[in-house]
Amino acid sequence: MADPADRVPDNIEGHWFVDKQCIDCDLCRTTAPDNFKQNEEEGYSFVYKQPESDEEIELCQQALDDCPVEAIGSDGD
Protein backbone atom coordinates (compact mmCIF):
# COMPACT_ATOMS: atom_id res chain seq x y z
CA MET A 1 0.00 0.00 0.00
CA ALA A 2 1.33 3.42 -0.97
CA ASP A 3 2.44 5.62 1.91
CA PRO A 4 1.13 9.21 1.77
CA ALA A 5 4.01 10.30 4.01
CA ASP A 6 6.53 8.97 1.44
CA ARG A 7 5.27 10.72 -1.71
CA VAL A 8 7.72 11.53 -4.47
CA PRO A 9 8.30 15.30 -4.60
CA ASP A 10 6.97 15.83 -8.14
CA ASN A 11 3.36 14.88 -7.34
CA ILE A 12 0.92 17.72 -7.83
CA GLU A 13 -1.07 18.52 -4.72
CA GLY A 14 -4.22 16.44 -4.33
CA HIS A 15 -5.60 13.08 -3.31
CA TRP A 16 -3.78 10.91 -5.87
CA PHE A 17 -0.03 10.35 -5.48
CA VAL A 18 2.94 8.08 -6.19
CA ASP A 19 5.32 7.15 -3.38
CA LYS A 20 9.02 6.32 -3.36
CA GLN A 21 8.41 2.59 -3.92
CA CYS A 22 7.88 3.35 -7.64
CA ILE A 23 10.11 1.31 -9.94
CA ASP A 24 9.24 3.33 -13.08
CA CYS A 25 7.63 0.37 -14.82
CA ASP A 26 5.48 2.61 -17.09
CA LEU A 27 2.18 0.90 -16.18
CA CYS A 28 0.53 4.04 -14.77
CA ARG A 29 1.71 6.22 -17.65
CA THR A 30 0.31 3.72 -20.11
CA THR A 31 -2.96 3.22 -18.23
CA ALA A 32 -3.65 6.87 -17.36
CA PRO A 33 -1.36 8.99 -19.54
CA ASP A 34 -3.31 12.19 -18.85
CA ASN A 35 -2.49 11.95 -15.15
CA PHE A 36 0.96 10.37 -14.76
CA LYS A 37 4.36 11.45 -16.07
CA GLN A 38 7.92 10.20 -15.70
CA ASN A 39 10.81 11.82 -13.90
CA GLU A 40 13.49 10.43 -16.20
CA GLU A 41 16.43 11.67 -14.14
CA GLU A 42 15.27 10.06 -10.89
CA GLY A 43 13.52 7.02 -12.43
CA TYR A 44 9.98 7.21 -11.12
CA SER A 45 6.49 8.24 -12.15
CA PHE A 46 4.37 10.90 -10.49
CA VAL A 47 0.90 12.44 -10.65
CA TYR A 48 1.14 15.62 -12.68
CA LYS A 49 -2.62 16.16 -13.04
CA GLN A 50 -5.27 15.08 -10.57
CA PRO A 51 -8.14 13.19 -12.23
CA GLU A 52 -11.07 15.46 -13.08
CA SER A 53 -13.58 13.19 -14.77
CA ASP A 54 -15.12 9.83 -13.95
CA GLU A 55 -13.08 8.29 -16.77
CA GLU A 56 -9.81 9.70 -15.41
CA ILE A 57 -10.68 8.49 -11.90
CA GLU A 58 -11.44 5.03 -13.27
CA LEU A 59 -8.11 4.90 -15.17
CA CYS A 60 -6.16 6.10 -12.11
CA GLN A 61 -7.92 3.48 -9.99
CA GLN A 62 -6.99 0.83 -12.55
CA ALA A 63 -3.35 1.98 -12.39
CA LEU A 64 -3.50 1.84 -8.58
CA ASP A 65 -4.98 -1.67 -8.64
CA ASP A 66 -2.45 -2.96 -11.18
CA CYS A 67 0.72 -1.28 -9.84
CA PRO A 68 3.19 -4.12 -9.21
CA VAL A 69 4.76 -2.45 -6.16
CA GLU A 70 1.67 -0.66 -4.81
CA ALA A 71 3.31 2.75 -5.22
CA ILE A 72 0.12 4.58 -6.25
CA GLY A 73 -2.25 5.87 -3.64
CA SER A 74 -5.29 8.00 -3.07
CA ASP A 75 -6.03 9.48 0.31
CA GLY A 76 -9.29 11.13 -0.68
CA ASP A 77 -12.80 10.37 -1.78
Image (tube, rainbow, N blue to C red):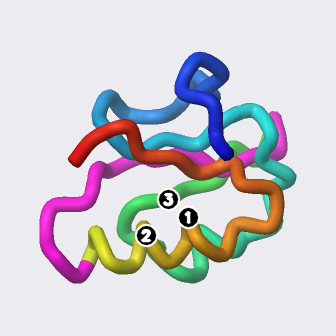
Question: Which sits in the foreground, 13 or 4?
Answer: 4
Residue 67 % position (x, y): 70, 67
- Circles 1 and 3: CB distance less than 8 Å? no
Residue 11 % position (x, y): 48, 34
Q: Which residue is mark 3?
A: 36
Q: Residue furthest left?
A: 53
Question: Is residue 43 shown above or below 14?
Answer: below
In the displayed structure, does residue 7 sit left or right of residue 16? right
Image quarter of the N terminus: top right
Query: Which residue is depicted at the point 80% across and 67% down?
Result: 68
Q: CA distance from mark 1 to mark 2?
A: 5 Å
- Circles 1 and 2: CB distance less than 8 Å? yes
In the displayed structure, does residue 33 sit left or right of residue 1? left
Q: What is the three-letter code of the residue carrying label 3? A: Phe
Q: Secondary structure at mark 3?
A: strand
Range of magenta residues = 42-55
Q: CA distance from mark 1 to mark 3?
A: 11 Å
Q: Which residue is mark 2?
A: 61
Question: Is residue 32 shown above or below 43?
Answer: below
Determine which quarter of the picture holds residue 58: bottom left
Sequence order check, earlier mark of 1 and 3: 3
Residue 76 located within the stretch drawn in magenta: no
In the displayed structure, does residue 19 sit left or right of residue 62? right
The label nearer to you, 1 versus 3, is: 1
Residue 51 located within the stretch drawn in magenta: yes
Q: What is the three-letter code of the residue carrying label 1? A: Leu
Q: Which residue is mark 1?
A: 64
Q: Residue furthest top?
A: 5
